[in-house]
Image (spheres, grey):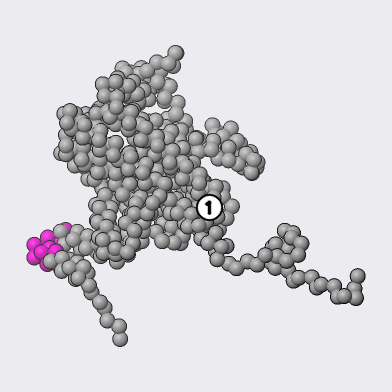
Amino acid sequence: MTHLRIGPVEGLLLVVLAVCLGLAITTGRPALLIGLVTACTLLVAAFLSTPLSLYILVFSMLLSPEVMVGGLAGKGATAGRGLTLRFDDVLLVVFGFVWLAKLAIHKDRPPLLRTPLNWPIMLYTAVSLLATLMGVLQGHVKPLNGFFYNLKYFEYFFLYFMVVNSITSQQQAKNLIVASFVACFLVSLYAIGQIPTGERVSAPFEGESGEPNTLGGYLVFMLAICTGLLLTPGATSRKLPPMILMGTASLALMATLSRASFLAAGVIVLGVVGFVTHRRPILLILVLVGLLSSPFWTPDIVKKRLLSTFTQAPEQGQVHVGAMRLDTSTSERLHAWKRSLEIWRQSPIVGFGVTGGPFMDAMYPRVLTEMGTLGLMAFGVLIWSLFRLGWRVFRDSPDPPARGMALGFMFGLAGLLVHAVGSNAFIIVRIMEPFWLYAALLARAYLLQRSTQAAQPEETQSAPVEPPQGRWSPVSRLAGPQPRAPRPSAGQP
């Protein structure tokens, strides 16, 4: 008969849960009771199974509600916006602390695995904190604002380290990919269901106004991952599910009417064309036919959205390029680039700190004003390290799914770099959480590849190999030791 052993940590956890549930029951508040029961269930699940907590996080990335904390509006940086907190933010904090507690308990495990992204992440984090600290000292940043915004921006780095150090097998990585595809499919169906309303679609729980640009960036990245897996031989045994996902996600992407997302998708198409030119000419022909026929099959509302960039009625603040007149949204982003250079001249080294400058809906001007030249350089190092990691896995990994994921990741990163021209793509949590999830899976594949390569020479050296006898040839070397030819007897010539 087996007995359930409860250690001191498990016992303390059960006592805390019992006290919380007892207090909730005595208060007589059903909502509080339900919330505490849910929180306790998730806490126990996270403590008992780290992979289970990762699956919960994957589905909560785009399917969790959010709340606006209006009291944390920054000085100029948020332009009246509050700090948006979502349920998966809370989940990530809870699961993260449980993961750290388990690391403290199991001291035989290494605290953090060494990956190619560790020091670029630390460099970017250090520059951001330094810039924010300087902004606080100079009076540009409120300490509470800077702290919480930095914390929110860096939570996806925490997700990266948590996934890298929790995944122990290729099967777990594949299961997370499948879970992310299922979540993307559900989000796409939700977006498609909004099309009859005539409004621009957005992800679930985005508030009253919604964020179509955010949904577009997320869909572009997930479409890139699907494309990489489909283009890599052996990456997926069944082509139909990824193709169905690509169809639904593409329809949802068009319904966002996000021009930055359309540009990002165009970059991915160009990358695919360059990739298949010498490998599969038939795919190149199909892509070119699709592009040339796009005016006939593209929905009218999408064509009107694209043409509105140049056909908007005259309004104040529009930028004129020769005889053309750009719409107010595009003009505002161009003005942001101009303002960022003017602000950068005032503090060119470290900028004004996170939330210290005016709000800009473009990633590169925002980095320049908030973190200065050092921040822009640290951001460039981080992006280069991500591309390099993807290329290493795609070039050297013997695992086809890992190679397909790496190819799609590079496509997606290129698309997000274009998307960031008209959005804050690299600090939007709903885009960055899936992005850094796949970055962690790539890093784990890279570490597995290196460990396999390191084990092969050891096996070769440990195997006893006798030198071949007689004449050497490649065939005899492969065949192993050959029998020595008999010596001629005294009577033989």
Q: What secondary structure do most residues of the magenta stretch adopt? A: helix
The quadrant where residue 84 appears = top left
Asked whether 21 falls inside the magenta stretch, the response is yes
The residue lying at 73 percent from left, 69 percent from top is 482
Q: Is residue 462 visible?
A: yes
Residue 446 screen position, x and y as percent? 47, 52
User: SS at mark 1?
Assistant: loop
What percent of the width, then of the height, locates residue 376?
35, 31
Mark 1 closeness class: few <14, some 14–19, many ≥20 residues within 10 Å: many
Q: Residue furthest top?
A: 322
Give the answer, above or below, for where 112 lies relative to 339.
Answer: below
Any part of residue 255 in sight: no
**Above or below, comparing residue 238 to residue 464 in the picture:** above
Residue 50 is left or right of residue 288, and the answer is left
Name the residue located 39 percent from the left edge and 30 percent from the top edge: 421
Spot occupied by residue 100 in the image (x, y as percentages of width and height)? 27, 57
User: Which residue is rendered at x = 32% and y = 31% of the image?
Assistant: 374
Q: Residue 282's image quarter?
A: top right
Q: Which residues are magenta?
A: 20-31
